[in-house]
Image: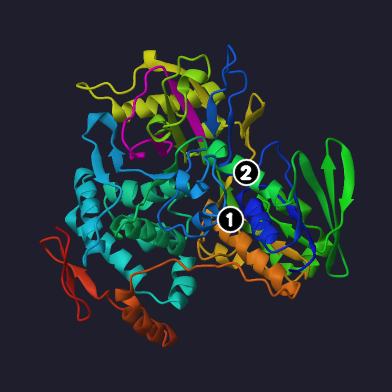
Amino acid sequence: MPSGTVAVLGGGVAGLSAAHELAERGFTVTVYESSARFGGKARSYGVRGSGTGGRHDLPAEHGFRFFPGFYRHLPDTMKRIPGPRPGHRVFDELVAADRMMLAREGGADELITAAHAPASLDDFAAVTQFMFTVCTGLGISPEDQAFFVDRLLVLLTSCDERRYGQWENQSWWQFVDAEHRSPGFRRFLADGLTRMLVAAQAQEISARTGGYILLQLIFDLSRAGGHADRLLDGPTSEVWIDPWVAHLRGAGVDLRTDTEVDGIDCAHGRIAGVTVDHHGARETVAADHYLAAMPVEQLRPLLSPALVAAEPRLAATRRLRTRWMNGVMFYLHRDVPVLAGHTIYSDSDWALTSISQRQFWPRTDFARLGDGHVGGVLSVDVSDWERPSRRTGKVASKCSADEIKAEVWAQLKDHLNDPGRVVLEDANLASAFLDEDITFPNPSATANAEPLLINTAGSWADRPDAVTSVPNLFLASDFVRTHTDLATMEGANEAARRAVNGILDASRSSARRCEVWKLAEPSIFGLARTLDRVRWKLGHRPAKPPLRVTADGGLEPVGLVGRLTLR
């Protein structure tokens, strides 16, 4: 085993993932985390002061955790973490949601589908049928529906060169020609999907990123035994982050909280040291290798002229953009399950999605939480903080905490309640909590300590690799180039693996490399992608997909595959 020291700057999912892989390979690792808790955006915590009479504080999250079936890197790590239950691994704490629901405003019938599907030759077509049902309910014409499927097929049959050379530089809005489509198409298929899934606007996110993540979710719905929607069976830190931290400490990792990185000293093209501050006490950290596992907005202030000169690609990170995606927790006297899975509020001004948590937390004793009278938790993600609410005319980022909680609650009621059924009642609301990362420095300002990176069109060129030109500096964060290509826990874990592999190469280690996987795609489109590579080299536009939508809702072959039915 190699001997060497690594300073990991940041204790979120990327930093902990890197520490895990390095410790397994014999490195001496110290992790420096600026906050009081490990886990970054994935952490959970207690609502301070909410526990009375010796009870625990109510659980709160930065936002609900969501583990799609296409994740491979993070589940692989979770399988190597002893779980909170004897004989179990953290991976065993994942449970599959059974349903997904699209709730519409004004009492319209909800659209519900299974969050999984059996295997068949027409997997892709079967799942797309739900999209047709959704589109019909939203007033999207059959022509626009067919066009949308055609766009997905264009992505599937495009070679990698076209994906990065053409679709990366187009926005999702441009790619789906939203400007010339129906209002329903623009609201749901163009803007709605990107806002609710990745907190991005359709006019800014790249078609490559938005389109291929959407396809991965569709594949999850159609893959035999696959699940598009998995959750943890308890508060995140309780069932995952805390056991992970304990496992790393047991493996010899030195984990330090409340320690902020003040400076990165670059001299002669190498990192000479890192200055950290712990409650006012400053020290210079020296290590063989430095692994920056920090969000881009935290790393940018540390980019000195000497460091940028040594690694010019870091200068482009200043062009990367972030948006907000944060959670609001509603604590209910009486549990309201709503649905055995996630609900998407398709008409909500602030792009809301929610999960009713208690049904997935079987071992959580709610009688021992808060004041003992909370029976359920509705966890909501707010994904659009810049669109005005029709009710108040204000954007979420300009509202007070009370205004945010009141407006989110009202938008939920707009979608779930109708004249014949009241799902959410004001009398059932015990309290509400806004993610602690949202702060209010003064009455006219709102700040977010942990925004989310957005893959804007063309931003791939501005994102660095995990291995830099500085021989002892490596990057592990969700802005690093990865196959996952999205600011997610999976992307952070993959970036950490790439950085660790770079350290292994730099130290000439014989230890096995971390596995890194590409996103899976149906092999049935392999020939079409090969042919498109030829067209790309010849400078031709993409060919028509090998499938076309027929008048009866089927997918008809154009010379390559057998007929698939959407019915």
Task: State yes or no: residue 344 in magenta.
Answer: yes
Name the residue tied to disc 1. 492
Rendered location of residue 69, percent (x, y) = 40, 55
State the SS at label 2. helix
Asked if residue 176 is among those painted magenta in the image, a careful observer would answer: no
Residue occupied by mark 2? 40
Q: Is residue 388 visible?
A: no
Contact, CB < 8 Å: mark 2 with mark 1? Answer: yes
Write the residue at 23% across / 44% down. Answer: 138
Can you give x and y, in whole percent of width and height, for residue 300 in the image?
72, 53
In the displayed structure, would residue 564 be above or below residue 101? below
Secondary structure of the residue carrying tag 1 is: helix
Report the amino acid beneath label 2.
Answer: Gly
Which residue is pictured at 62% across the width and 70% down the height?
513
- As measured in the structure, the alpha-carbon distance from the residue carrying label 2 to the one carrying label 1 is 11 Å
Q: Quadrant of residue 520?
A: bottom left
What's drawn in magenta, residue-wise? 327-355
> Where, quadrant-wise, is the N terminus in this rendering?
bottom right
Colouring convention used in this rendered image of the protein: rainbow
Is 456 displayed left or right of 70 in the figure? Answer: right
